[in-house]
Amino acid sequence: MSKKTLFSLNNLILGVIALGVFFWFYQISKLSPLAGDDWAFHNNAMSDGIIGSALGMYQGWEGRLMTLFSVHFFMLNRSIWEIFNASMYVVIFLIGAFIIKPKNAILYALVFLVVIFTIKDNIRMEVFTWTTGSVYYGIPLLISVIYVGVQYWLLENSSAQKPWFLWIIAMASALYLPLGMENIAIGCLGLNVFMILMMWIKSKRIDLFQLALFVSFVIAYIIWGLSPGSSIRLSQMPEWQSLSLIEKVMQTLPNVLFFTFSQNKYLILILSTVLVVYNWQKGKGIIRWAYSPVLIIAIGMTFTQRIALLVPNLDFIQILADEYSYLSLGFWFIYALVLIANIVHIDLQNSKVTLTPMLFVAVLSSASLLMSPVIGYRLMVYSVFYLMFVIMFVINQIQINKIIFVLTAILSILLIVQNANILRNKYQTVHQITQERLAILADYKVYYEQYKDGIWLPRYPIYTIHGGDIEIEDAYHMKAFKTYFDLPQNETLIFYWKDSY
């Protein structure tokens, strides 16, 4: 890479934004306390060590061995986690730029920041600001992006000699992912199979590099499957185990559609809009007309709940606003099929594999949850980021006039600044409450005899810290909290809401 290329305006813009991304994530990481499972993992690591505790949980709880090593390490090295957590999203931002090669760095950065600052509160508090969540879900996201970056490099340099460090990076990623988080691992394994088939069709040979990745995935899945802890957890779900394949899919499909589409309104609004623009500008024949009606309806669907508040007497709007209604779920199922068809059609039209791999990972990471007994917001962080990359790829291929660009930039910046300010205030409040809690607990250690009605601790504001407050009936986390803060197990803890928020 020449100095001229390295110090291009686009790269300088990306570098400045990357620093901003790091600063924001670092600040909220420092302001976020240990919470929920963090206390238990810290206690285990202190008593049994990082390796001993991780292997113990592999034997008795789950098969995500690499995640278990990582989470226990970061519990004992909180300051390292704060830097690492912030750095993860910088790396994701920069690798995304490496893959997409945005023609307009400002638009690329704005889309990334809009998604970061409008992402569902539940995803943010369960992945961005929770140590356990950042390790369980954030690190696999980072590793998957690195892995996908390697695959895109191979798409562009299929005939080039693969350097040794590329083998190490890709194989380490393939070994980590199944032992990190299952649904993104399936997405990346699916991409590996896709690459094997594509290269077979193209050259009638199996690529040794892709075969080595496939073997790495298989080895990791075997280690995961041999975990006694995984078998123990599955045995605790007899009702789920008794369901047939079709029954499992039918039970989980509404939740997958809900969490993937209905709950990511800004993402779907941007994705649908840029596809409509692309289809109008670049589409030929069926592309221009076939997909746009469904995409336009999807844009309207992102506003149905607001419209329902304005016109509460319109039954049809109320049904659409109900995200679990048959009409709403049916539409999002059709939207998923149209989205896949549109993206694949674009790549076929351009005779270039560009969008499909990103969509492949996004779809598989969500679709794999059809076979999971547990579905939640945090598991959707993968489809959110990979659909975001799809958006950026499409934007790279459309023409945007200066007026539209300026208006889009202004609206995006206003949205980003507004949400960043709200979140800054929230996490400053979180830090204040953490300090108040610590002061109360320190006072208790000295004047414990005066705490006849138990220890009263203020709760965190809603949608800020996952698992930061404990309900009385939650014996597991109550015990972990008391152990972490060296409190008597028979002491009463009451978490209460403050009037100030």
Image: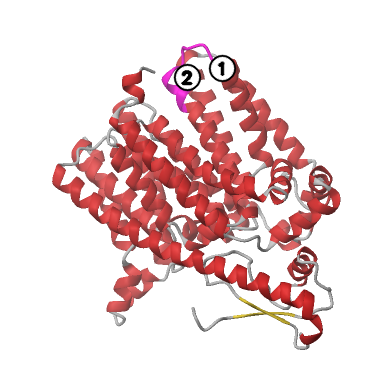
- Judging by the rendered image, the residue that carries numbered circle 2 is 201
Q: Secondary structure at mark 2?
A: helix
State which quarter of the image contains the N terminus. top left
Instruction: Name which residue lies at 68% across and 63% down.
Output: 36
Q: Is residue 262 left or right of residue 144?
A: left
- Judging by the rendered image, the residue that carries numbered circle 1 is 207
Q: Is residue 341 visible?
A: no
* Residue 147 inside the magenta-drawn segment: no
Disc 1 crowd rating (10 Å Cα; few below 14, some 14-19, many 20+) is: some
For the residues marked 1 and 2, what is the alpha-carbon distance in whole angstroms?
Answer: 11 Å
Q: Is residue 222 visible?
A: yes
Residue 184 quadrant: top right
For badge 2, the amino acid type reads Ile
Q: Position of residue 352 (x, y in %)?
A: 35, 26
Q: Nearer the viewer, residue 472 or 58?
A: 472
Q: Is residue 245 left or right of residue 60?
A: left
Which portion, as a residue range, is magenta? 152-162
Return the disc, 1 or 2, that comes first in the chain's sequence.
Answer: 2
Q: Position of residue 293 (x, y in %)?
A: 26, 52
Q: Is residue 163 left or right of residue 321?
A: right
Instruction: Name which residue lies at 78% across and 81% down.
Output: 447
Q: Is residue 311 above or below residue 253?
A: below
Instruction: Name which residue lies at 56% across and 29% down.
Output: 193
Q: Position of residue 158 (x, y in %)?
A: 46, 16
For badge 1, the amino acid type reads Asp
Q: Nearer the viewer, residue 83 or 95?
A: 83
Residue 19 quadrant: top left
Q: How many marks?
A: 2
Disc 2 crowd rating (10 Å Cα; few below 14, some 14-19, many 20+) is: few
Q: Position of residue 70 (x, y in %)?
A: 69, 43
Q: Secondary structure at mark 1?
A: loop
Q: Is residue 215 above or below residue 92?
A: above
